Amino acid sequence: MPIIHLKDMTKDEEETFAEVGAGSIDFLPILKWGEQHGIEWYVVEQDVCKGNPMTSLQLSITNLHNYAIQLDNEKTKK
């Protein structure tokens, strides 16, 4: 099962954990690579949450959904 583990980190000097897509890591190239190389599962891990863990997870899922829309839009332009 091709799987990739996703984490993000804050843009401040602490560089602690952030929701996927809310931090300093540029996920679009990573996700493009994953789609081109048969990744089937993207696992989100949020080690530390400043707020409610379920709210953090929802933000990560929303951001990944938005990335998926961007990838689909790029495919249809080609």
Image (cartoon, rainbow, N blue to C red):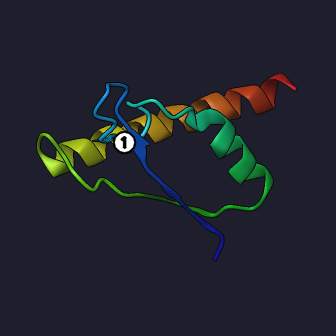
Q: Which residue appears farthest toward the bottom when viewing the image?
A: 1
| Image quadrant where residue 61 sits | top left
- Which quadrant does the N terminus fall into? bottom right
Q: Amino acid at mark 1?
A: Ser
Front in this rendered view, residue 46 or 41: 46
Q: Is residue 35 left or right of residue 25?
A: right
Location of residue 65 with respect to 40 vertically, above or below: above
Query: Mark 1 Cα within 10 Å, few/some/many (few <14, many 20+)?
Result: many
Q: Residue at x 42, y 42 (%)?
A: 8
Q: Position of residue 35 (x, y in %)?
A: 72, 51
Q: Is residue 17 left or right of residue 26?
A: left
Q: Position of residue 17 (x, y in %)?
A: 31, 44
Location of residue 10 with respect to 33 vertically, above or below: above
Q: Is residue 48 left or right of residue 13?
A: left
Front in this rendered view, residue 74 or 52: 52
The residue wearing badge 1 is 60
Q: Residue at x 32, y 25 (%)?
A: 12
Location of residue 45 with respect to 29 vertically, above or below: below
Q: Is residue 55 left or right of residue 57?
A: left
